[in-house]
Image (tube, helix red, strand yellow):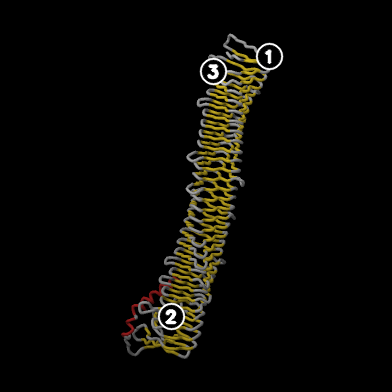
């Protein structure tokens, strides 16, 4: 029994036969000294006084059940419980000393801790009322805050065991978890100061952070409810989100570990994904604040990442789902790879490596800056403004469609080996180097303009359609394997040079000069410039063939044909090609006729007109048909082919056999080109 029990009035001790029942009653009482109260498993003790104060240092409760019925039970000493200690409903248990629970401590009233409250390993502390900690609360066992109940910490709460909140847990002090902390569904955990997780923190209710919430390295924070950060949330371990994770505009969320979003992550504040860390989105990530990536962001297949403000990638950003920059700013200074859908209606800036292997759609502004490489290996649709700045490289190997404005700046490179389509009403401006490689196709129905500083090199298929305008103020070159087909307008004050390949002009071509140094120039259009057909040697002849089959090619300028130039004229029974020159015709090289009909008809056929003439063809190749003569007759402003009946056969001059193989190749090439046109 207790000794040294002092009271201002009489104290009653009642012993009942059903067990040992100790009833302590007084208006006010003080218990000091060292005491031990023990009993059997069926023993029951009740404290009932207006106020009972314990000041002793070694108060030990060893019985099974101790209930506080006092209005105010105060411990200022050292109280150890190895049984069941219950603070009844409506009663107050205040600890400003040391209260240690090693078995069962149940609070149904108000439990206030200003001292040290320790729940040992194996101990159970259950709050069914109000538990307030302003001192030190250490939990090594099981601490439960029940449904609808309140646990408030303004001191130090350390959990090394299991802490379960099913009510309201408010921390305005220091809450450190190195065990297991559960915030259950329907419950609320609010932190306004410091919450540190060095164990496992699982939230399936509501977790609100207005202070500092830290998830340490190697530890796990799992959210399947609502987690809202309004100040500082730092993850150095593993943060798994299966619910709603919100970083408010006043909040900073820093990931230095692994952050996996499998539901909804909304950032309107500042979100950092640090170097060496990984942010994986498998559902929906929305950024209306500032998202900065220095590590790795993976937006998986079927997931949605939406940016409406500022997204900066200085690490690795891989999109296999949907990445939308809606009127925001997306800046890539390292590696951005798209395998899914990348949609930009804001400003997308690339200064390093942007690779599109999916669908990239730009209706805003897309900048590929100096040192930047933008590579399209699948589909890139531009209806806004796409600018490849000086020092940048834009490479298309599959399908690039421009329905807006595409600009290739000075000292920039645009290399196409796929299909580049410039639609009606759209503009492609080239101030740098535009290369259409072998196997590539450029189709223009809008305006494609190469400026004075620019170069257009074609070794593929370059089609200027009927509603297209191709402007050249710089240098346009058609190389080996290149076919330039003009059915619209080619204009400008630049130079057109063909080293090999084929130029088919069925529209209007206006340049400072047209130089055919190899390959074939043909078509039924108009060329408003001086034309030179020279070639370089017998293995690289240059050909001019009016029409696509039999037709007229008009040159409003002078025409010069060199020693390795060939004028190829096609005729049949009733018609013949015509090269109409408005200026001076300076002749040399070879004139070759090709009969494509079935029956020779007699007559005179006009194949060449000019204002004046200088020189003559070095050689003329005629068809050989028994019984017919083919003669070329020159007038002051024309040249005709005269077909007459022969009296005797005249053999073909032996000297012409030197050019025969090349010319046979030319005739075949011309016919193949005609098939391309038709």
Q: In front of the other: label 1 or label 2?
A: 1
Q: Dot 2, how many residues are within 10 Å of its Cα: few (below 14), some (14-19), or many (20+)?
A: many
Residue 198 at what x, y percent from top left? 51, 37
Q: Total of numbered circles in the picture?
A: 3
The nearer-to-camera label among 2 and 3 is 3
Residue tagged 1: 9
In this rendering, the answer to whether 362 lies above or below 649 is above
Q: Between 568 and 94, which is closer to the camera in this rendering?
A: 94
**Mark closest to the chain's N terminus, 2 or 3:** 3
- The answer to whether the residues at label 1 and label 2 have Cβ atoms under 8 Å apart is no
Q: Is residue 475 above or below residue 383?
A: below
Q: Quadrant of residue 569?
A: bottom left
Q: Quadrant of the N terminus?
A: top right
Secondary structure beneath dot 1 equals: loop
Determine which residue is flagged by label 3: 62
Check residue 533 in the rendering and tell me which mark sits there, or answer none.
2
Image coordinates for residue 647, horizontal then vertical, percent: 34, 90
Which is more N-terminal, label 2 or label 1?
A: 1
Report, in whole angstroms, how far the alpha carbon at label 3 lies from the one at label 1. 27 Å
The secondary structure type at the circle numbered 2 is: strand
Q: Secondary structure at mark 3?
A: loop
Specify the label residue 166 is tagged with.
none
Residue 84 position in % (x across, y down): 56, 20
**Residue 572 appears in the rendering:** no
Task: Choose mark 3 or mark 1, whichever is in front.
Answer: 1
Query: Is 490 in front, or is 55?
Result: 55
Q: Give the percent coordinates (x, y) of residue 500.
A: 41, 74
Query: Cβ–Cβ below 8 Å for labels 3 and 1?
Result: no
Above or below residue 51? Residue 443 is below
Viewer can see residue 328: yes
Distance from disc 2 to disc 3, alpha carbons, whole Å, reads 115 Å
Locate residue 289 relative to residue 617 in the image: left or right: right
């Amino acid at each position: 029994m207790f000794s040294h029990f002092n009271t201002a009035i009489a104290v009653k001790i009642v012993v009942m036969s059903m067990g040992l029942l100790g009833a302590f009653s007084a208006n006010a009482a003080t218990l000091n000294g060292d005491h031990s109260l023990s009993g059997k498993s069926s023993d029951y003790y009740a404290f009932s006084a207006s106020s009972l104060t314990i000041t002793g240092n070694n108060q030990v409760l060893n019985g099974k059940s101790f209930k506080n019925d006092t209005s105010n039970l105060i411990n200022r000493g050292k109280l150890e419980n190895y049984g069941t200690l219950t603070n009844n409903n409506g009663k107050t248990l205040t600890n400003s000393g040391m209260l240690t629970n090693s078995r069962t401590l149940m609070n149904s009233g108000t439990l206030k801790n200003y001292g040290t409250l320790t729940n040992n390993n194996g101990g159970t502390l259950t709050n069914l009322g109000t538990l307030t900690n302003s001192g030190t609360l250490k939990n090594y066992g099981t601490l439960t805050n029940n449904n609808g109940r309140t646990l408030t910490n303004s001191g130090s709460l350390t959990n090394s065991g299991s802490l379960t909140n099913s009510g309201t847990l408010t921390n305005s002090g220091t809450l450190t978890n190195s065990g297991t902390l559960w915030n259950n569904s329907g419950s609320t955990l609010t932190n306004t100061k410091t919450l540190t997780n060095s164990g496992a923190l699982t939230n399936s209710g509501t977790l609100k952070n207005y202070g500092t919430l830290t998830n340490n390295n190697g530890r796990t924070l799992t959210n399947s409810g609502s987690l809202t950060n309004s100040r500082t949330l730092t993850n150095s371990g593993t943060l798994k989100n299966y619910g709603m994770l919100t970083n408010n505009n006043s909040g900073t969320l820093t990931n230095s570990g692994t952050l996996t979003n499998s539901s909804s992550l909304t950032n309107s504040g500042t979100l950092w994904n640090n170097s060496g860390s990984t942010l994986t989105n498998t559902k929906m990530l929305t950024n209306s604040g500032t998202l900065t990536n220095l590590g790795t962001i993976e937006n998986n297949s079927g997931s949605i990442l939406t940016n409406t403000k500022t997204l900066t990638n200085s690490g690795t950003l891989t999109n296999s789902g949907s990445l939308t920059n809606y009127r925001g700013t997306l800046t890539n200074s390292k590696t951005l790879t798209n395998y899914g859908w990348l949609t930009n209606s804001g400003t997308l800036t690339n200064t390093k490596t942007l690779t599109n292997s999916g669908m990239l759609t730009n209706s805003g502004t897309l900048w590929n800056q100096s040192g930047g490489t933008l590579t399209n290996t699948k589909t890139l649709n531009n209806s806004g403004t796409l600018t490849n700045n000086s020092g940048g490289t834009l490479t298309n190997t599959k399908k690039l469609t421009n329905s807006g404005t595409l600009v290739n700046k000075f000292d920039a490179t645009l290399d196409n080996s796929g299909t580049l389509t410039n639609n009606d009403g759209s503009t492609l401006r080239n101030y740098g180097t535009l290369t259409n490689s072998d196997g590539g196709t450029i189709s223009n129905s809008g305006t494609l303009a190469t400026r004075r500083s620019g170069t257009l090199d074609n070794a593929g298929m370059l089609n200027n359609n009927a509603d297209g305008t191709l402007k050249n103020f710089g240098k346009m070159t058609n190389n080996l394997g290149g076919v330039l087909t003009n059915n619209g307008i080619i204009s400008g004050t630049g130079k057109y040079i063909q080293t090999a390949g084929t130029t088919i002009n069925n529209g209007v071509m206006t340049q400072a000069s047209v130089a055919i140094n190899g390959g074939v120039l043909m078509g039924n259009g108009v060329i408003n410039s001086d034309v030179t057909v020279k070639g370089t040697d017998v293995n690289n002849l240059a050909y001019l063939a009016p029409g696509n089959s039999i037709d007229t090619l008009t040159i409003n300028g002078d025409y010069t044909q060199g020693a390795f130039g060939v004028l190829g004229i096609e005729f049949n029974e009733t018609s013949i090609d015509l090269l109409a020159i408005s200026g001076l015709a300076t002749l040399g090289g070879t004139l070759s006729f090709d009969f494509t009909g079935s029956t020779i008809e007699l007559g005179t056929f006009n194949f060449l007109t000019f204002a004046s003439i200088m020189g003559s063809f070095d050689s003329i190749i005629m068809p050989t048909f028994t019984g017919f003569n083919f003669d070329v007759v020159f007038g002051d402003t024309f040249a005709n082919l005269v077909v007459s009946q022969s009296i005797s056969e005249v053999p073909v001059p032996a000297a012409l056999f030197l050019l025969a193989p090349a010319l046979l190749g030319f005739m075949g090439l011309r016919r193949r080109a005609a098939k391309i046109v038709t």
